[in-house]
Amino acid sequence: MRSAPDPSNNLFDDLRICSRVIDSCGLACSSGFVAVPWEVEGGGLIGAIRLENQMRKPPVIKLKGHTSSILDLQFNPCFSEILASGSEDLTIRVWEIPHNDESVKEIKDPQCILKGHKKKISIIDWNPMNYYIMCSSGFDSFVNIWDIENEKRAFQIIMPKKLSSLKWNVKGSLLSGTCVGKHMHIIDPRKKEIASSFHIHNGGKNTKNIWVDGLGGDENYILSTGFSKNNLREMKLWDLKNTSSALVTMSIDNASAPLIPHYDESTGLIYVIGKGDGNCRYYQHSLGSIRKVNEYKSCSPFRSFGFLPKQICDVYKCEIGRVYKNENNSSIRPISFYVPRKNPTKFQEDLYPPILMHDPDSSSRNWINGKDNKMERINVKDLTQDDLRITKKYKFVPQSFNSIIIGEEYTSKRTSIIRQFTKKFTFFKKGLHNDGFSSVDSFKESVFIYPKSFKEKGLLTEQGGAQFSASNSLERGAEEAAREAAEEHPDEQPDEHPDEQFPLEGEPPCDGTSRGTSELPVRSGDPVRLARGRTRRGSGANCFDALRCARLCRRREF
């Protein structure tokens, strides 16, 4: 098996690829496009190029919508025109890029906008067998499972630490994630739990993982890449039946960049690339053992890279894999992996085992309910053009909407603090007959608030005091409470001067500087109640503080 650049020396040249280094591959490929984060001030722009436009200054379709840098992007495994991108702006956007319409130069409205993360989104991954299911993770240590077909967030799992990689198995039933705590977690998303966890590497740097299953592997095998205690890059193969020790441990070199693996489930080939490295190593897995096949070497490093789907490889050149390499943030070069044969024009059955067949009519409802889709395979030579580029509409977006918004919108930190503050200092209707302030609820039922007095003291503006008119529900509630108290105790004489019990009018105006000094007046005659009132004068002071803050917030708005 050999590797070489395109012999025609054709490449995507004179590009403006974003130079920011991210943890993901940084480049996505489908049967029709290659997509990369585009260089723009502030970030958030994606450039998509058709594969056939392999030339200098190719036409670029620009996807505009994100307001911050792109951290990960990936094409749908079935719909070659559907691209998902995760960003620092806390959103995931699902784009549809029309392949046949060459007049499209710019797309501003994605099909869907997924909201639900509280911090940057660093990882996204499509389910390989359920094309409307996607997982995502970010700096908030949450794993979200999105059901795009039914427009909802299906499941959410809380992880102990931030994940550095997250991958589906080939059946789309389990997730494997590695975190900065040197552990790997096997996640069952439909049960919303971590099925198992085990220690993988001793080094402190980022670790990556990928399932080694399908035709060339085993459903219980997982490959992890990381660092040893001596900061040597290493690769380990794990069997989930026994995670006490690795099946295979291979030390590679002492470079500093984390290794990112890619697995071809039909042939069992494992490609390993480190960002900043000039070489690509590839290995062969067979029955729990791994052997090195060969290595592609180059003087120019991998800035970012992406592997082409297996069904697009040229079978009549014995090409079994192709990676697109971003060399210097200005050009993308295709690198082919092929097997020399005497008669390459004849289809080689042994090089191209049956691959997974994608059904665009499959629904996500069965998967949500716990039923996995049946895995069917098709021979590469039997694929048609319709199988390679599925033209079915992925998602119908009503004309009245630019994009479908899925999930909850995360409020900013400033808005969250204001909401908590206003919720803490909220005034309720207060009752007349209550013995003491033994709890917060009893305090709510025992103190009258007279808004007119606050307005006269300068604690409320004219607009704020307008809501406290004579017909206001607070004053009506106070009058009704007094009437009910008189009916319950007809022998007691009503107070001729009720304002004397709450001498707000006689208090000096608030200067806005003191805190916790306002006294809460209580009814006389009950020593127990007086004692309780004295110990809880701070609660009354909070009421004045809340009104004071309400006035300051209103001034800032104007």
Image (cartoon, rainbow, N blue to C red):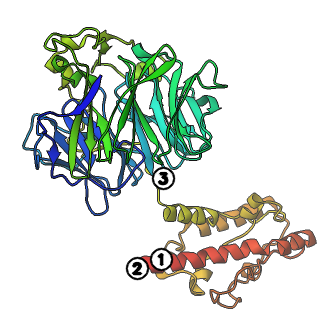
* Residue under numbered circle 2: 558
Nearest the viewer among 63 and 462 is 63
The Cα–Cα distance between marks 2 and 3, rounded to whole angstroms, is 31 Å
Judged by depth in the image, the label closer to the viewer, 2 or 3, is 3
Whichever of callouts 3 and 1 sits on the residue coming sooner in the sequence is 3
* Residue under numbered circle 3: 119
Q: Is residue 504 left or right of residue 203?
A: right
Whichever of callouts 2 and 3 sits on the residue coming sooner in the sequence is 3
Q: Residue at x 54, y 75 (%)?
A: 550
In this rendering, is residue 457 above or below 13?
below
Give amino acid for label 1: Arg
**Residue 259 locus on image (x, y percent):** 45, 39
Q: Is residue 450 visible?
A: no
Label 1 near label 2: C-beta < 8 Å?
Answer: yes
The quadrant in which residue 100 appears is top left
Mark 2: give few (<14), some (14-19) or many (20+) Cα within 10 Å.
few
Q: Which mark is residue 554?
A: 1
Mark 3: give few (<14), some (14-19) or many (20+) Cα within 10 Å.
some
Q: Which mark is residue 181?
A: none
